[in-house]
Structure formats: structure tokens, C-alpha cells
Image: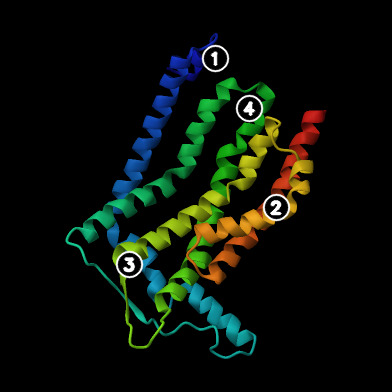
């Protein structure tokens, strides 16, 4: 059913389900197309992107090393010694990891198109003035998601990998990290950061429908700090550096979301 048909008269519940189904089908097809591309270019996805975080010359590690030198601390923040190796311990481990990782890559690459389909689904129900602002959904949502992905990949994930991969309770115990465990840590942390950065967009829509107000967010700011720390502890591996690193942008996004809610409510009042 086309959008023009959606605008003609009232649609039944089944009609809405049918429209939603086709939006989901198109989104799934785009995800699979990107996933297939990621599957084909496995050398780039694994060697140059995901597994690159175990190399001492990874951009983040070089950045921290440069900062250490600028602060006059020598090699204190340099990560030149990689003390763990990645192994595969199951027959189908590498193949199944290849498939799952390709699907995650497909989801990340297709995210802007998924937002586009979301906009197409909700736009017939919006008024002309609301459509004008909703058009920015794809751009702003994609921008926030990309920022979150980059932040997770270049900061939260590599610090988690270094801390957990090199942590030892005894010199007699060697770290040999399972491939699935390593890939899961990198992809999960990175993807979660991308989704978490969508907070301002979520607040925008909640404010539009009257659920969220700036007064409410200011009143419960202290509670939000506690919740942010808890969420960071749940979403990141159990090391303090990753938790703090994720909580900082979350708190900044929360303050930015208050400003967004204020603008939305101010326009609604007029």
C-alpha cells in the first residue's frame, strides 16, 4: 500500500500492519545487502576494523601515547605490549562469527535507511508543520548514531579490550581470548554506543507527544546521573575506565536533551 493510499480516509488496524510489514521488509532487504557486502569483504571488516584493536599501533593507543608524552609522563599511557592472543576453539566458530558480524555490520550501515523507513511510516499521520520537522529525523538520527559508533569504536571498545585482555591475576596465567568473546565485546560495545547516542532524538519525540518536559528532566537530574552510571556499568565490560568514558557523553546528551525538550515545549505553547 502506497503512502498516497495511506492518506485517503481512515486506515484499519490491519491496513497499518500491512504498511508496517512492507517497511520492515524493505529495511530487512537493505540490511541483508550490506551484510552480504560485509561478508564478502571479510579481510577489511576483520583485519582492518575489528581485530585492529588488538594491535599496538591502533589509532586510539597512539593517541594516548602522544598525550602521555605531551603531559611529560613518558610512556605511562602507551600500550605497546599486547599480552593476549585470540584463538578459536570450536569447529564452526570462525564461520558463525563471520555470519553474525556481517549481520551486525549490515545493521550499522543500513541504520540511516532504517530511519528513512521510520519517517515514511509515521509521516502520513503527521500534520504539514510536523512533517517539516520530522524530515530532519533521518539526518539527525544518522548523525547521532554515527557519532556514537565512532565514540564506541575508538574510545570505549579499545580501552575495554586492553584492560580485560591484558588483565592478569598471576603471571603464570596466560590470556588466550576466544574469538567469539573478542568480537562480541567490540561489536556490542560499539553498537550500544551508537544506540545510546539516539537519546536526544528519543527525547524530542517524547516531548512532542507531551510525555517529556524540561522541568521533569531538571527535577530528576540527580536520578539521571545515578541511572547513567548504572546503565554504563551494564552496557560496558566490567572496567571502570569504560564505564566512566560512556557515562560522560551520556550526561552531556542528557543536558542537551533538556535543551531540546525546552525548545519543543516552547513551540508547542505558541
Tell me the number on the disc at residue 7. Answer: 1
Closest to the observer, 62 or 12: 12
Which numbered disc, 1 or 3, marks the residue that appears first in the sequence?
1
Q: Is residue 227 visible?
A: yes
Please give the name of the residue rendered at 44% of the width and 25% of the height, measured from the top-left corner: 20
Q: CA distance from mark 4 to mark 3?
A: 43 Å
In-image side of 136 versus 170 (left or right): right
In-image side of 121 versus 126 (left or right): left
Colour mapping: rainbow
User: Residue 82: where, in percent of width, then height?
Assistant: 39, 81
SS type, badge 1 = helix
Q: CA distance from mark 1 to mark 2?
A: 42 Å
**Residue designated by label 3:** 47
User: Residue 76: where, in percent of width, then height?
Assistant: 55, 87
Considering only vertical position in the picture, is 53 above or below 98?
A: below
Estimate how packed mark 1 is, as few (under 14), some (14 to 19) or many (20 or more) residues with alpha carbons within 10 Å: few
- Badge 4 vs badge 3, beta-carbon distance below 8 Å: no
Which numbered disc, 1 or 2, marks the residue that appears first in the sequence?
1
Which numbered disc, 4 or 2, marks the residue that appears first in the sequence?
4
**Residue designated by label 2:** 223
Please give the name of the residue rendered at 37% of the width and 88% of the height, measured from the top-left corner: 171
Considering only vertical position in the picture, is 39 above or below 164?
A: above
Please give the name of the residue rendered at 78% of the width and 47% of the height, measured from the top-left corner: 219
Q: CA distance from mark 1 to mark 3?
A: 49 Å
SS type, badge 3 = helix
**Residue designated by label 4:** 131
- Nearest to the eye among marks 4 and 2: give it: 2
Amino acid at each position: 500500500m502506497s503512502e498516497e493510499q495511506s492518506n485517503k480516509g481512515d486506515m484499519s488496524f490491519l491496513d497499518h500492519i500491512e504498511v508496517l510489514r512492507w517497511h520492515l521488509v524493505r529495511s530487512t532487504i537493505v540490511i541483508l545487502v550490506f551484510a552480504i557486502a560485509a561478508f564478502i569483504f571479510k579481510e577489511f571488516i576483520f583485519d582492518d576494523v575489528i581485530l585492529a584493536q588488538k594491535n599496538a599501533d591502533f589509532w586510539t593507543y597512539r593517541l594516548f601515547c602522544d598525550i602521555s608524552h605531551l603531559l611529560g609522563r613518558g610512556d605511562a599511557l602507551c600500550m605497546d605490549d599486547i599480552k593476549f592472543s585470540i584463538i578459536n576453539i570450536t569447529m564452526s566458530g570462525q564461520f558463525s562469527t563471520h555470519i553474525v558480524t556481517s549481520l551486525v555490520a549490515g545493521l550499522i550501515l543500513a541504520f540511516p535507511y532504517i530511519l528513512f523507513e521510520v519517517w515514511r511510516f509515521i509521516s502520513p499521520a503527521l500534520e504539514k508543520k510536523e512533517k517539516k520537522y520530522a524530515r530532519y529525523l533521518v539526518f539527525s538520527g544518522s548523525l547521532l548514531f554515527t557519532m556514537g559508533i565512532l565514540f564506541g569504536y575508538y574510545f570505549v571498545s579499545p580501552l575495554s579490550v586492553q584492560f580485560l585482555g591484558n588483565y592478569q591475576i598471576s603471571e603464570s596465567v596466560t590470556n588466550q581470548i576466544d574469538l567469539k568473546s573478542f568480537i562480541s565485546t567490540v561489536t556490542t560495545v560499539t553498537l550500544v554506543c551508537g544506540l545510546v547516542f539516539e537519546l536526544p532524538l528519543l527525547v524530542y519525540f517524547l516531548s512532542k507527544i507531551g510525555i517529556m518536559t524540561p522541568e521533569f528532566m531538571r527535577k530528576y537530574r540527580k536520578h539521571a546521573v545515578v541511572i547513567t552510571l548504572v546503565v554504563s556499568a551494564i552496557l560496558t565490560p566490567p572496567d571502570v575506565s569504560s564505564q566512566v568514558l560512556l557515562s560522560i557523553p551520556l550526561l552531556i546528551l542528557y543536558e542537551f536533551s533538556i535543551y531540546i525538550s525546552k525548545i519543543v515545549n516552547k513551540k508547542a505553547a505558541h
